[in-house]
Amino acid sequence: MTIISTGIEGLVEIQPQVFPDSRGAFCELYNEERYKAAGILNHFCQENLSKSTYGVIRGLHFQLNPYSQAKLATCLQGRVLDVAVDLRKGSPTYGQWRSVILDSDKHNEFLIPQGFAHGFAVLTETAVFNYRCDNPYHPESEGGIAYDDPDLNIDWMIPVDKRIVSEKDAHRTLLKDVQTNFEWK
């Protein structure tokens, strides 16, 4: 596997080795020992899957400490724009975001550390999105940032008139007003 830096500490794209042949392709998406050898020490305890149609934007979500979640995301069918925003106070990249196009043909993954807001946009007719978490869902610690925050200016690659957003995500807090308890170490 290849680890690709995003320029934000801990936030990386992972490209597994893919073995194509006349039958299709095979790749190992996750191998705890291989990940540990690469310095990825998360212990994932929950796995989530969502199926969405073109234009759906989910996010930007996070959970406060002590329930903060690191996520290992991939797209099993289709393509998504996966986005992470650094919310770690004191981080030299606080408030910055990075994105990766997760493509089921590439089998790439995005590792999002604890202390980040996370969201994705569906770029194909449908997409099946899968992510592992190192802490279980805890609704009382859930928070979010407006996906369309003008200070972030994220290019979701979806025209405004084609965006499909939940009522909850349509009314999230701006980054400048969000309260978190994440610290950069």
Image (tube, grey):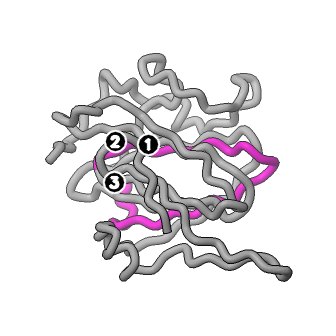
Q: CA distance from mark 2 to mark 1?
A: 10 Å
On screen, residue 135 above or below 82: below
**Circle nearer the N terminus (2, 3):** 2
Q: Are marks 1 and 3 in contact (CB under 8 Å)?
A: no
In the image, residue 183 lies in the stretch drawn in magenta: no
Please state which of the two labelled residues, at mark 2 or mark 3, is closer to the viewer: 2
- Residue 81 position, x and y percent, is 61, 43
| Residue shown at 46% from the left, 38% from the top | 98
Check disc 1 and report the residue beneath it: 84
Mark 3 residue type: Pro
- Residue type beneath disc 2: Ile
Q: What crowding class fits label 3: few (fewer than 14 Cα within 10 Å), some (14-19), or many (20 or more)?
A: many
As drawn, 82 above or below 179 = below
The segment highlighted magenta reads: 115-140
**Residue 122: mark in rendering:** none
Q: Amino acid at mark 1?
A: Ala
The answer to whether residue 118 is magenta is yes
Residue placed most toward the observer, 110 or 88: 110
Q: Position of residue 48 (x, y in %)?
A: 53, 66
Identify which residue, 108 or 43, lies in the foreground: 108
Q: Secondary structure at mark 3?
A: loop
In this view, the residue in front, 9 or 90, is: 9
Disc nearer the start of the sequence (1/3): 1
Q: Circle 2 sits on which residue?
A: 8
Q: From the viewer's perspective, is 104 left or right of 146?
A: right
Q: Which residue is mark 3?
A: 113
> What residue appears at the point 27 percent right and 49 percent down from the top-left corner?
64
CA distance for labels 1 and 3: 9 Å
Q: Are marks 2 and 1 in contact (CB under 8 Å)?
A: yes
